[in-house]
């Protein structure tokens, strides 16, 4: 018993007050964090940049074109393309061309509009009209209002329907998709997590504490990211913003569930009190939780070697989120659990067993919280793995390989423009209307920046390229000016309209031919950018990133596993299984995307994001499992270690997997194909890893390999386990 300064024993009440001091301080500190920094979870949109430059490779030719275009900033604009079609679907009415031109002339001088709009031009089929209104490039929140002004003016043409297409309309729809992302995404994710925890754990206070800890972690992470983004150190876009929220909530919940389950188990030990139980729970959970967080954080930081701006932004932002999540799980939650004690698990409070009591449940670690499936289910699964390990891993391996066989069918060459939004975005419908009546690349020209002395030869070379409909120099008004192009620092801009839709494979092929042609013009020093070029460069860079980042992430994870498990064979085995899980997930995703969701392609970054999240998070659950198996193997031998470890952790890890899958599935509320695809890949992959790979494949392989799995560590030198009777197997106590 602790003593006073005079040597007399401290009374029990004083001891309790002393032991409660640190948890109270931690709790007050996190409440201050939540109150002071919590609002930042809804403010990242203030520093988010959702322009195209956020998604481009920094060394690509199209990015260099954007940089050179800044020299034309005084005339640089974002075009809004106005398209009129007859309401009855017939040819444009006589006189409509003049009416359309007059209607847009009234926009001259309006706020946000640069110069007079172009004259209306009829399509070759005579069924549509087109005009271009040049807008200021940085309208921000005023863009939707400006587009509404244009739409109202254009609606003055009788007998026609007005559509707004082009980069300005697309930018408005993209901003709308991310509008309110903070509150909507956070609300959906938290409600899903709370419902799952209430159903699975049948406890009132524990789910609320876990959710509160996740919210505190998110507030801290968002505050740090906000400060860095506001200072220009870190770039944040809507995708990073959404993924950060989901990642922090999911990771913080996972780590909290592991600690809460271990604490409950320790509370049920003979003679345990809440302080000693938390000390043991923290001591035994700290290493796997920190190792799991390190795999995710370092895996995300590997994105820093990417040449894509949004990938590089996600790396440090995600790592900051993981650090905040693990900090909350190892400080706030222990403090809250110690202060509430067994009441945290009400109405199913764990009751301490009498001193000296030894039961099979306590020995095997199965006296844990009611979790997914219940202890009886995991006893049966562990018994199956113990009884027929080779059959279990052979069947599961065959099933995973069958799914992985479809992985090459996943088309990651880009998402067509009409599939970028999963809802009915007005800009998509307008672009389709524009493409039916005008050249496919109208409104999204290839932008050529070249030396002024070679402009005529550049135009001639461009127009000779198959797949290029027209090419013309741009004047001071931002419109065609064959005789008087605008010259800035000896450079001119030439717009080349492609025959095919800007997002099509045919357009990208034409773009490659166009670059070859203008690069060959002597003295032109020509660069080709624009929408199609940006897609082309992004796809090529993403393919390069995959070949570089994938082995880096695998190497990082392997090193962490070797250090944690003190083994070489088992880490290699775990890395191989999570890689197989990723391949199987991609195979299933290729089928679902094409035949269920109707996607004809995915963004080139989708497989990379899926890999980083699935491999890092998949290793998380294997770390939780195998660190417990290692602990039990040292006490009971290899065979019993697998059985006890799987039985003890099966429920809590499965619950954590379900929660993480639900949080990532919440990304589907954002109507963008990229995030919907990421949501499915990660949610399905986590469930596949949790329910199949970690529950069956990994323990069966480790059970079949025996001590060899732990080579060259000390556990590899343990004697083989003796076969026990069915009764002892069921009881859970080794002979």
Image (cartoon, rainbow, N blue to C red):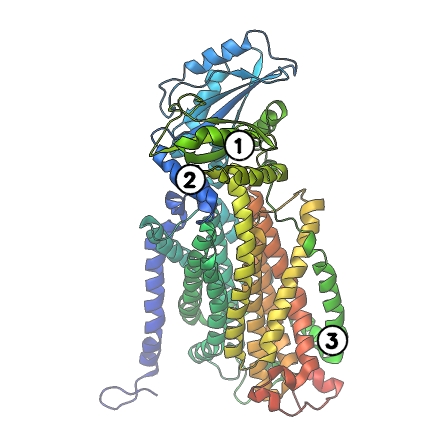
Closer-to-camera residue (153/510) = 510
Viewer can see residue 320? yes
Q: Residue 476 location in percent, x, y?
A: 37, 24
Query: Which residue is at a point 68% across and 56% down the rendered structure image?
Result: 407
The residue closer to the viewer here, 181 or 126, is 126
Callout in the foreground (2, 1) = 1
Measuring from the top left, give residue 672's x and y in whole percent.
55, 42
Which mark is nearer the camera, 1 or 3?
1
Label located before the other in sequence (1 or 3): 3
Q: Which residue is mark 2?
A: 66
Relative to 480, is 34 on the left or the right?
left
Name the disc covering residue 384, or none. Answer: 3
Secondary element type, mark 1: helix
- Dot 2: within a 10 Å radius of its alpha carbon, few (fewer than 14), some, or many (20 or more) residues? some
The part of the image, by quadrant, that contains residue 512 is top right
Is 658 located above or below residue 465 in the figure?
Answer: below
Q: Quadrant of the C terminus?
A: bottom right
Give the total of numbered labels.
3
Crowding at mark 3 (Cα within 10 Å: few <14, some 14-19, many 20+): some
Which residue carries the number 1 mark?
461
Q: Nearer the viewer, residue 141 or 436?
A: 436
Is 297 left or right of 705, judged from the image as shown? Answer: left
Question: Viewer-nearest of labels 2 and 3?
Answer: 2
Q: CA distance from mark 2 to mark 3?
A: 61 Å
Q: Residue furthest left?
A: 6
Badge 2 or badge 1: first in the primary sequence: 2
In this view, the residue farthest toward the front is: 522
Q: Based on the displayed image, in which of its 4 quarters is residue 396 positioned?
A: bottom right
């Amino acid at each position: 018993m602790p003593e006073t300064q005079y040597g007399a024993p401290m009374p029990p009440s004083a001891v309790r007050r002393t032991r409660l001091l640190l948890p109270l301080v931690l709790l007050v500190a996190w409440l201050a964090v939540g109150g002071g920094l919590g609002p930042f979870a809804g403010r990242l949109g203030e520093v988010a940049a959702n322009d195209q430059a956020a998604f481009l490779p920094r060394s690509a030719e199209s990015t260099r074109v954007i940089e050179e275009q800044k020299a034309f900033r005084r005339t640089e604009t974002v075009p809004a393309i106005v398209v009129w079609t007859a309401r009855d679907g017939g040819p444009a009415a006589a006189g409509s061309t003049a009416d359309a031109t007059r209607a847009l002339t009234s926009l001259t001088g309006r706020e946000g509009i640069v110069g007079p709009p172009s004259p209306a031009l009829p399509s070759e089929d005579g069924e549509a009209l087109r005009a271009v209104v040049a807008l200021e490039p940085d309208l921000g929140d005023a863009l939707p209002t400006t587009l509404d002004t244009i739409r109202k003016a254009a609606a003055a043409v009788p007998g026609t329907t007005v559509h707004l297409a082009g980069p300005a309309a697309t930018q408005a729809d993209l901003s709308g998709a991310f509008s309110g992302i903070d509150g909507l995404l956070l609300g959906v994710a938290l409600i899903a997590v709370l419902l799952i925890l209430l159903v699975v754990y049948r406890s009132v206070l524990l789910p609320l504490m876990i959710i509160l800890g996740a919210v505190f972690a998110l507030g801290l992470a968002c505050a740090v990211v906000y400060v860095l983004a506001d200072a220009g150190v870190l770039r944040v876009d809507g995708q990073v913003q959404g993924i950060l929220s989901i990642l922090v909530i999911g990771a913080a919940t996972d780590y909290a569930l592991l600690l809460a389950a271990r604490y409950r188990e320790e509370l049920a030990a003979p003679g345990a009190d809440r302080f000693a139980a938390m000390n043991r729970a923290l001591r035994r959970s700290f290493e796997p939780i920190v190792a799991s967080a390190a795999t995710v954080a370092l895996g995300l930081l590997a994105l820093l070697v990417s040449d894509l701006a949004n990938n590089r932004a996600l790396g440090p932002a995600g790592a900051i989120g993981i650090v905040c999540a693990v900090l909350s799980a190892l400080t706030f939650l222990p403090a809250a659990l110690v202060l509430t004690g067994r009441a945290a698990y009400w109405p199913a409070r764990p009751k301490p067993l009498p001193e000296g009591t030894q039961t099979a449940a306590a020995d095997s670690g199965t006296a844990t919280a009611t979790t997914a499936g219940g202890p009886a289910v995991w006893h049966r699964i562990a018994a199956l793995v113990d009884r027929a390990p080779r059959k279990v891993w052979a069947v599961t391996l065959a099933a995973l390989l069958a799914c992985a066989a479809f992985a090459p069918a996943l088309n990651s060459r880009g998402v067509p423009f009409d599939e970028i939004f999963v809802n009915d975005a007005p800009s998509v419908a307008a672009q389709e209307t524009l493409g039916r009546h005008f050249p496919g690349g109208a409104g999204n020209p290839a932008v050529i920046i070249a030396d002024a002395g070679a402009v005529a030869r550049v135009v001639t070379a461009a127009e000779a390229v198959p797949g290029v409909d027209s090419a013309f120099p741009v004047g001071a008004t931002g419109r065609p000016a064959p005789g008087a192009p605008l010259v800035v620092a000896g450079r001119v801009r030439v717009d080349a309209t492609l025959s095919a839709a800007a997002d099509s494979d045919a357009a990208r092929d034409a773009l490659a031919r166009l670059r070859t042609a203008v690069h060959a013009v002597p003295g032109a020093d020509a660069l080709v950018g624009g929408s199609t070029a940006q897609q082309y460069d992004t796809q090529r860079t993403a393919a390069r990133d995959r070949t570089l980042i994938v082995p880096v992430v695998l190497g990082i994870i392997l090193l962490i596993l070797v250090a944690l498990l003190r083994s070489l064979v088992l880490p290699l085995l775990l890395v191989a299984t999570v890689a197989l899980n990723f391949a199987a997930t991609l195979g299933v995703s290729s089928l679902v995307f094409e035949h269920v969701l109707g996607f004809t392609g995915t963004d080139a970054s989708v497989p990379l994001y899926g890999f980083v999240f699935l491999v890092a998070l998949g290793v998380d659950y294997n770390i939780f499992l195998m660190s417990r198996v290692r602990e039990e193997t040292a006490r009971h031998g290899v065979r019993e270690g697998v059985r006890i470890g799987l039985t003890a952790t099966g429920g809590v890890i499965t619950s954590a997997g379900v929660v993480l899958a639900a949080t990532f599935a919440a990304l589907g509320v954002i109507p963008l194909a990229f995030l919907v695809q990421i949501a499915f890949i990660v949610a399905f992959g986590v469930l596949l890893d949790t329910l199949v790979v970690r529950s069956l494949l990994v323990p069966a392989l480790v059970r079949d390999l025996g001590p060899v799995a732990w080579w060259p560590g000390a556990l590899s030198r343990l004697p083989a386990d003796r076969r026990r009777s069915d009764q002892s197997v069921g009881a859970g106590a080794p002979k």
